């Protein structure tokens, strides 16, 4: 006689509701709120959140977008190569981009980790920029950084690459093409950048500019800040379209707390003072990520 127990267990497994474990990153959009530092770099939470925000912004009719976040963990220490950054370069960037020779001491990817990481992020965003799984829009990536694209063996949905403001990159532009421009420089050049490389009514994304000439949050050129994460003293500023801007306090244990949400973009001075003063009120001088090893 057949033992009914295995069959009963199989039916129970099929019919029982599946409950995701706490702490798991939502499959599609990466969840709400600031990504986890620094797990969000490795478990695709940042990639999912940024892609979802860009997709929503484009669906809302936004064509000129800004995406800004630290391209590597501990970006301030990228030139020195912290163990976390080396892990990021080896296990993720070199492997995902299929870089010839991999991540080795003295290699281009190890010496220019930020630049190659930005190509990785552009690759992750390309699906959203082209219009999703069914989108047919070509997506080009242009950079002002030190990247040898001949070393990259896997570009994903990125259909071409080039250097910003070079004639070759201009001539290779195609109708209905979207562009992701990596670190193009001061925002006073952005309109000229769109004129040189953009196509009418197609998305143009400025991503991870290395510096700001407005010395404030976001930009003053009308580019929608679709995904924005900036470290400030004792905390962060975060925004994912169409959500609010948030000022977050980073606590001594590395967790974060939203201190205030803003329907419109606040000033850098305003959020910096709020977060810094709250940190001192709660922890005095005992909230230092450098001393506690949260790098």
Image: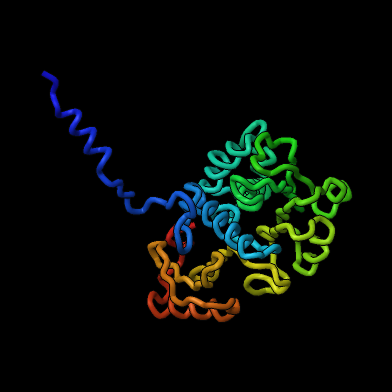
Is residue 8 rendered to the left or right of residue 43?
left
Q: How many marks?
A: 0
Q: Position of residue 167 (x, y in %)?
A: 89, 50
Task: Work out whether 290 lies above or below 279.
Answer: above
Q: Position of residue 205 (x, y in %)?
A: 69, 58
**Which sits in the foreground, 295 or 97?**
97
Residue at image point 43% right, 69% down: 287
Residue at image point 55% right, 48% down: 85
Quadrant in the picture for residue 198? bottom right
**Which sits in the foreground, 70 or 22?**
22
Quadrant in the picture for residue 54? bottom right
**Which sits in the foreground, 211 or 126?**
126
Task: Work out whether 269 lies above or below 230.
Answer: below
- Regarding residue 79, the answer to whether it shows in the image is no
- Regarding residue 115, the answer to whether it shows in the image is yes
**Which sits in the foreground, 110 or 268?**
268
Rendered-image quadrant of the N terminus: top left
């Amino acid at each position: 006689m057949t033992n009914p127990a295995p069959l009963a267990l199989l039916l129970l497994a099929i019919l029982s509701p599946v409950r995701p474990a706490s702490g798991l990153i939502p499959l599609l959009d990466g969840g709400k709120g600031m990504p986890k530092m620094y797990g969000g770099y490795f478990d695709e939470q940042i990639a999912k959140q940024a892609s979802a925000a860009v997709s929503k912004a484009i669906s809302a009719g936004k064509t000129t977008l800004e995406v800004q976040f630290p391209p590597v963990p501990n970006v301030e220490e990228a030139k020195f190569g912290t163990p976390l950054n080396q892990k990021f370069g080896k296990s993720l960037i070199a492997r995902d981009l299929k870089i010839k020779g991999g991540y080795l001491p003295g290699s281009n990817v190890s010496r220019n980790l930020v630049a190659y990481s930005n190509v990785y992020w552009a690759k992750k965003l390309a699906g959203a920029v082209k219009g999703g799984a069914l989108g047919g829009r070509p997506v080009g990536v242009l950079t002002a950084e030190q990247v040898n694209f001949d070393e990259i063996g896997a570009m994903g949905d990125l259909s071409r690459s080039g250097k910003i403001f070079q004639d070759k990159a201009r001539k290779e532009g195609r109708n209905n093409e979207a562009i992701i421009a990596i670190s193009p420089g001061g925002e006073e050049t952005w309109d000229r950048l769109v004129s040189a490389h953009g196509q009418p009514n197609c998305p143009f994304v400025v991503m991870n500019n290395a510096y700001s000439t407005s010395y404030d949050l976001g930009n003053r050129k009308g580019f929608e800040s679709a995904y924005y994460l900036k470290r400030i003293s004792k905390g962060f500023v975060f925004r994912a379209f169409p959500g609010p801007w948030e000022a977050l306090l980073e606590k001594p244990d590395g967790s974060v707390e939203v201190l205030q949400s803003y329907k419109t973009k606040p000033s850098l001075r305003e959020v910096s003072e709020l977060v810094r003063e709250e940190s001192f009120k709660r922890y005095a001088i005992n909230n230092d990520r450098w001393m506690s090893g949260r790098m």
